[in-house]
Amino acid sequence: MDFKYLPCPIKNVQITESNAFDSLVVIEDNGTPKAVADYVVESKKFDKAFSNDVSCFKVNNQTIIFCPLAINDYSDVREYFNAAKKGIERAVKAGYAKPTLLLPSSPRFKNGQLSAILGALAGLYVPIQYREASPANVSRIQHLFVTSADKTDIGEVLKQAIFLGSALQISRDIGGGDPERMAPPRVAEYVEEAFKGGRIKMEVISDQDRIEKDFPLFGAVNRAARAVPRHHGRIIFLEYVPPKPSRKTLMLVGKGVTYDTGGADIKAGGIMAGMSRDKCGAAALAGFMKFVEMASPEDVHVVIALCMVRNSVGEECYVADEILTSRAGVRVRVGNTDAEGRMAMADSLALMKERVVKENLKDPHLYTVATLTGHACLAVGDYTAVMDNKVAENNGHGLNFCKAGDILGDPAEISPLRPEDFTFHRSKAYGEDLLQCNNLPSSRTPRGHQTPAAFLIMASGLDHHDASSTKPIKYTHLDIAGSAGDIPHPPTGAPILALAQLHLM
Ligand SMILES: [Zn+2]
């Protein structure tokens, strides 16, 4: 067999030039080696569980970890991701330290191989805090080998897997770190380290007074945390300028709420646990920027803002009824301090819009990416909800985004914006423009995941750049509350794969 070496920069998977593998992870497919396929046919005759569970057995003195697939009309490429993940986890459990993943050859899913490698890497992930606390356990195996069943050249697949795997690793580290390990200043340190010496420009805004002045809605959320220096908010900008004149510009703003207590409207009754994951939007974008850096597109300009803030409680915390003026000059009455994600992002989104206009950026598309609402989980389950403004919708963005997500196993569903979503947030009080939020959980508010997109459009002033304006700007809000992944599982990294596939692959 011809083994390809995976020179993976992912720190918890050490790879060497050796090809002395000790076990073969096989995903049930057309490419399953004949001896193994024969064994499988025999086993299925006497073991009804064989088609559902990963098995470990020997054929011709070679250890095989066999991962069955159950594919039907509604299946997608994630079947390969999950099979490889379970297979690698089973190999580790069985005590094998140098497994080889035999890549499947699916005629239906052309990214089955890529998805399988990403699944294996997900199965080998070691959380950052365990890596730091216990260097001896920094990797779960010694080597990961990858080869293809059909002997095709997998060089390109490996390259993509390394790029995407590195991006996903960063998103898992930041998103999965606890509220202290990944407090805003430490996220800034991590990001600085991750992009050190490369071509990504980085600017971190740490001056708390400047934050309050230039990003007033973010500043309101950050106010309680100002009493604790190690929890101070940070706005982190990353920028990739392509070598050739840019053809399009992506500007993405991520919600990085490192811990969400709910603020004065505190999350009571045991619903606070898990809120360290409220930074997964920013975490995914930091990862996406790693993909951009490694893929180095020649004519795509990418700018990212990571809005890292802790929604704390204390005597300085912002409260409902406060009237604040956003960076875009929009007067906002706070309705509920637990709706802090839209506050954290609106001013950075306004800044992106200002840059589009001032610098006349080429074919811009603005995004917000956030674990924003419980309503999104109810409405679309474990999927990303895509909300286009009319300019993006007219461009066919939502459908293309979902199609891209399907191709790489990072699926999404469209939630159209309606007039009611905007009406909902328009203030009824004289002298005020917007009401930030009602006083029910989003999960008990009709259209509870769509209205925040309307709020973001209006609070950032993007409503002046709608389809009928002289300078229309494409904007899409991605609610990843359902797709980001919950404790005890590592973050999924959604929507890195969909964004990469749509814009850069
Ligand atoms: Zn909240």
Image: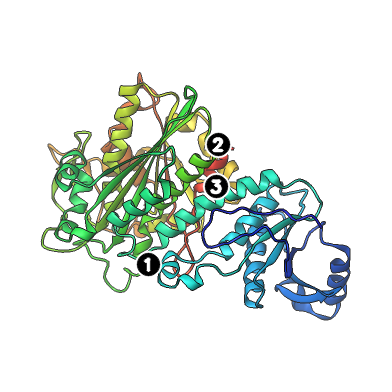
- Please give left or right for residue 275 compared with residue 414 in the image: left
Q: Position of residue 243 (x, y in %)?
A: 48, 27
Q: Which residue is mark 1?
A: 274
Q: Quadrant of ligand 1?
A: bottom left
Q: Nearer the viewer, residue 474 or 291?
A: 291
Q: Position of residue 29 (x, y in %)?
A: 79, 59
Q: Is residue 276 visible to us here?
A: yes
Residue at 42% in and 50% down: 194
The reply to whether dot 3 and dot 1 touch (C-beta < 8 Å) is no
Amino acid type of the residue tagged 2 in the rendering: Leu
Q: How much space separates mark 2 and mark 1, taking CA atoms?
A: 32 Å
Dot 3 or dot 2: first in sequence order is 3
Label 2 CA crowd tier, 10 Å (few <14, some 14–19, many 20+): few
State which quadrant residue 257 falls in: bottom left
Q: How much space separates mark 3 and mark 1, taking CA atoms?
A: 24 Å
Amino acid type of the residue tagged 1 in the rendering: Gly
Q: Is residue 447 visible to us here?
A: no
Q: How much space separates mark 3 and mark 2, taking CA atoms?
A: 10 Å
Q: Nearer the viewer, residue 167 or 82?
A: 167
Q: Which residue is mark 3?
A: 497
Ligand 1 lies under 8 Å from the Cβ of mark 3: no
The reply to whether dot 3 and dot 2 touch (C-beta < 8 Å) is no
Quarter of the picture holding the N terminus: bottom right
Q: Which residue is mark 2?
A: 504
- Please give left or right for residue 412 compared with residue 477 in the image: right
